[in-house]
Image (tube, grey):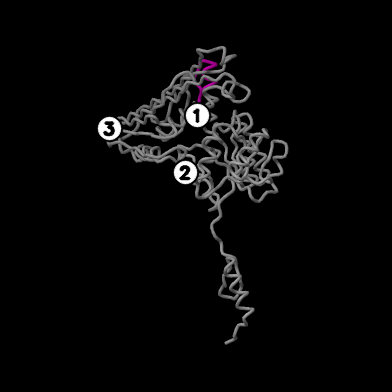
Amino acid sequence: MQVLSRRTALKNMTLTGAGFFLLPNGLWARSSAPKKLGIALVGLGYYSTDLLAPALQKTANCYLAGIVTGTPAKAEKWQKQYNIPDKNIYNYQNFDQIANNPDIDVVYVVLPPSMHEEYVIRAANAGKHVWCEKPMAMTEKACLNMIAACKKNKRNLAIGYRLHHEPTTKAWRQIIQKQQLGKVQSIENTAAYRDNRTNHWKQIRELGGGALLDMGVYAIQGARMAANAEPTAVLSATTSTTRPEIYTNGLEETAVAKLQFPGGIIADIKTSFGENSNFNYIQCEKGRLEIEPFSGYGNLKAKSPLGEIFNAYQVPQQQVNQMDNEALRIMNKQSALVPGEEGLRDIRIVEAIKKAAKTGKMVGL
């Protein structure tokens, strides 16, 4: 047996300490320790500041690696707070240079809906996986363009539907899917809150404003989850406002719609920026399943003849779960848990509701 020299032994020890190990054929290889994915947040408004950034301090599979902002003061503040390197800070002019940054694995688009299509496509073309906040986009065509760009570049596209990762929601959905209360008969859903702002993007049509694209997506999601199916038609819809000085030129403060699902299930949904209300009532053959609140950031409760479902956790745990789950899918080379196609379905329904409200007629889906 060959005796190793002291120099060779020391070299081998150094390599091993650096994360190398000896393969059976005598070759050295680096150990593949799990790597957290680097996330760059695009847009540093309330949702990024108060929810996503704090959540990224708690995630196991990803971390806050970079930011994209058009406000130098925000960039300086975030850099100090989260110790972000200079090279990982971008603005909207040099955004495409993110393609050359190996620290960034995922671009999370947290901009007004009117900007989602542009930045999702640019991120995908830069070779980055993309997460996009809801609503996915303002039109069905924009959604399709976003999906196509990510598929072309072989990148994941996930939509920020946190409730798909939320434990109470997952539990009551199982009751529906397994028909533990029998078949669903009817659904009543309201997603609304009083918004007193006057010049936020939610009050500006060109940026994606109006209740339907924001809270309305939650109501649509709630109905689709409750029915465990896709609607076949918008039977009727109306839009209105009690504050025309804020919601101008027909922009809806409130929308009400009746959706038809297979099997004769009817869902009455409502969304509004004019009142505080959040529930999902699902009438089944063997009793009623009530989730209230059903789309808040915490303390979601479901009750039915089967008992109560409640999971205690603190904000921003929903966002932690969402980002960790989607990061793990990327790491395992799997498709997104909540892909672009899920966001597309909701935007198609939003467009149908708007058409039904405008024409006063049923709109098929």
| Of the pair 204 and 233, the residue shown nearer to us | 204
Residue name at image x 63 percent, y 23 percent: 206
First-in-chain label (2 vs 1): 1
Determine whether label 3 and label 1 are within 8 Å by CB. Answer: no
Residue most toward the front?
80
Which of pointers 3 and 2 indicates the residue nearer the eye? Answer: 2
Q: Label 3 to label 2, Cα distance in Å?
A: 32 Å
The residue to which callout 1 is attached is: 217
Q: Which mark is residue 286?
A: 3
First-in-chain label (3 vs 2): 3
Up the image or down, 143 lies above or below 8; here it is: above
Which of pointers 2 and 1 indicates the residue nearer the eye? Answer: 2
Q: Is 252 displayed left or right of 315 in the figure? A: right
Magenta region: 353-365
The residue to which callout 2 is attached is: 321
Specify the amino acid type for callout 3.
Lys
Q: Label 2 to label 1, Cα distance in Å?
A: 20 Å
User: Which quarter of the rendered picture does the N terminus lie within?
Assistant: bottom right
Residue most toward the bottom?
1
